Amino acid sequence: MIGRLGARIGAVLSDVATTEGRLAATAGIVLVTLGVGWLLLPKAVRAGERTASDRVERLLDGRTDGSAGGAVETLREGVPASFLLRMAVGLSQLALFALAGVAVLTVWGQFDFVRSVLPVAENAVRVGGQVLLSAVLLGGAYVASDALETYVADLSADSDRITAHQEQILTRLAQVGLLILAGITVLGIWGVNLGGLLVGAGFLGIVLGMAARQTLGSLIAGFVLMFARPFEIGDWVEIGSEEGFVTDITIINTHMRNFDGEYVVVPNDLVANQAITNRSREGRLRIHMEVGIGYDDDPDEAAGIAEEVLEGIDAIANNPQPYAIPSGFGDSAILLDLRFWIDPPTPQARWRSKALAVERIQERFADAGISIPYPQRTVSYPPETAEAEETVERVERTDEDGDGRPNDRPA
């Protein structure tokens, strides 16, 4: 293509034979190139860019919804218009200056030199086109991934069935898939043998899978947690021996903050293999407490006082109402089981309600004369054991002298 273009330029300029004519032609080519390249071309590109942008905006305003509009806005932020404008002007100027150089060399009878460098130029154009196309694909994939994240976020905001964890997982999977597709396309542009590459990737995947079994197990468990949804970010959970609030859920790990302010990271494979207690899921939590009263006290009276105290605590919910029932016989007391609810369930509400219940029930029981006994133990001896001990004491007193020293006389 470039060879045919050079031949046409040579035919047009073949009549310029004198030195003066060549100088005039060279000056004209330089002036026209500078005028078009530095003055007219940037203005034309800017005008065309504004016209195209206005048309795209009108089209999008009429045919897209809110989520698509947010994606388009993300595209505009990811690729500034000034960058695209500078790139278009630069490429146009480069092509114009190259054409002017060929024309000048042809005027001065150096078309054979131009023809000798044409293969190099064609190869450079081809490589440059591949580089440009690869850059456009990768840049477009990166910008499209941001637009996809915005779209998924808007979709999640409009739906109650997509949690923050699922939104994060879906966004990352879509972004990785988009980048992998762009990478495969770029490799195809550069003529890379994808078949051999895929075979090598398969063997590499087997080796990595055997070496990173725990990581893969956590990865699979992360997908299981995404679909099972046993907890969400912000829930108060107990996983095995760890208890706290879920702060983040990734593909590999679950992040928690316990009540001591410590940052805990639990691999997802351990999360999936342990019992999970979610105290936030139902929106309320029932608390159990036990208090003992003396065997001489009235259980019904004590239960009524305890229920009255529980109903007067603000941290305890009144629906369902708290209640107290005798639950068993202890070693030193009759046990009352206190049951009440907190709404919403938080560690602070649990601790505060229990502390207030203990303090006020103890005061009311004391005012009502109801005892809260503590464990006591009475030691007694059988009659025969007591008589034997008295005999031993009497013998020991007989064997002592009046001065209190043992008697050493032979028996």
Image (cartoon, rainbow, N blue to C red):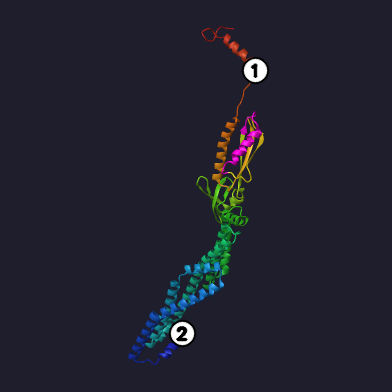
Residue 305 belongs to magenta span: yes
Image quadrant for the C terminus? top right
Check disc 2 and give the amino acid type: Gly
Residue 176 in sight in this render: no
Give the residue type that dot 1 points to: Thr
Q: Which mark is residue 385?
A: 1
Q: Nearer the viewer, residue 36 or 18?
A: 36
Image: 335 above or below 396: below
Residue under circle 2? 3
Marks 1 and 2, the one that precedes in the sequence: 2
Residue 179, image x, y percentages: 53, 66
Marks 1/2 in contact by CB < 8 Å: the verdict is no
Which residue is drawn at the image coordinates 60% and 11% (left, top)? Answer: 394
**Label 2 Cα neighbours within 10 Å, binned few <14 / some 14-19 / many ≥20:** some
Q: Is residue 157 visible?
A: yes
Q: Residue at x 58, y 31 (%)?
A: 367
Whole-angstrom CA distance, mark 1 to mark 2, is: 127 Å
- Label 1's element? helix
Q: Nearer the viewer, residue 310 or 244?
A: 310
Q: Nearer the viewer, residue 396 or 186?
A: 396
Residue at (34% x, 89% y) in the render: 24
Picture layout, residue 403 above or below residue 78 = above
Q: Position of residue 368 (x, y in %)?
A: 60, 31
Residue 185, given in percent of the width and then of the height, sits at 54, 71
Q: Is residue 232 magenta?
A: no
Spot occupied by residue 316 in the image (x, y as percentages of width and height): 58, 44
Residue 337, image quadrant: top right
Q: Which mark is residue 173?
A: none
Residue beneath the point at 54% across and 42% down? 352
Q: Quadrant of residue 107?
A: bottom left
What is the magenta range? 292-315
